[in-house]
Image (tube, rainbow, N blue to C red):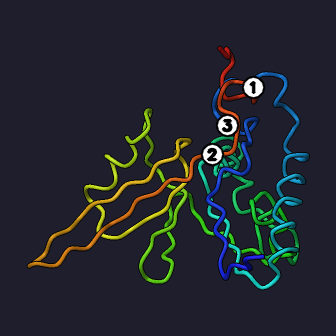
Amino acid sequence: VWQPHVIYLLGDHLDLAPWGKYSKPRAVMYTTTETLQCVHNWIAKFRKHCPSARIVYLEGNHENRIYRSIVDNMREAEGLRAALADKPVLSIPNLLALDKLDVEYLGPYGVESVLWNKVGVSHGTKHGQKVGQLLSKRLPSSTYSWVQGHDHKMALGTRAIHDRGNVSHIIGMCPGTLSRVDGAVPGVSLHPN
């Protein structure tokens, strides 16, 4: 109904636990193909319902797990391309077939996009263990408003900047996560409470 002009996917839509550096329970092994298909299908729904929107997928630290694993364990595969291909075989844009969905992929992990020359949008690299810690880390030095992922907790805060009688407000926001972080998803915790 809304038909937005721009949709930002803030990253970590793929967990990719088997590609990470931590010990993995058997339940997450051999799940990469199925996970890639599920995320592709999910993004395809955005494209179907918002055919003219610009969709930008920001690389999160979990998407970056494949790249780190390649660099650490299979250096020769870094940037490996099939004959006549323009994208690396094991890159997230290639694995998710983002070109077929007309979705832009923005990386590397940590890069920030600027929306309407006013708001920074990123996956984010800072987080806090408690609600509000992200804001206390990032807002004091912010000179512009921002939205970021990465932190699992929903947070919204403002900072007022006073300059010669004028007041401007910087807004920081994290929408939180829709994922289960209570240990039910394998890889979040090997010992759920």
The span from disc 2 to disc 3 (Cα, nearest Å) is: 20 Å
Amino acid under disc 1: Ala
**Residue 20 - label:** 3
The span from disc 1 to disc 2 (Cα, nearest Å) is: 14 Å
Which residue is located at x 73 percent, y 81 percent?
Answer: 53
- Mark 2 or 3: the one toward you: 2
Which residue of the protein is positioned furthest toward the left in this rendering? 164
Q: Is residue 29 left or right of residue 174?
A: right
Q: Look at the picture and state if 193 lies above or below 13.
A: above
Label 3's element?
A: loop
Q: Tell me where residue 134 appears, x and y as whole percent.
A: 40, 45
Amino acid under disc 3: Gly
- Residue beneath label 2, please? 177
Q: Tell me where residue 51 appears, x and y as whole percent.
A: 82, 81
Q: Nearer the viewer, residue 96 or 90?
A: 96
Which residue is located at x 67 percent, y 82 percent?
Answer: 5
Question: Within 10 Å of the Cα at label 1, are there few (<14), some (14-19), or many (20+) other Cα atoms?
Answer: some
Q: Look at the picture and state if 182 lies above or below 173.
A: above
The span from disc 3 to disc 1 (Cα, nearest Å) is: 18 Å
- Residue beneath label 1, please? 184
Give the mark nearer the N terminus: 2 vs 3: 3
Give the mark nearer the N terminus: 3 vs 1: 3
Q: In which image quadrant can residue 107 be found? A: bottom right
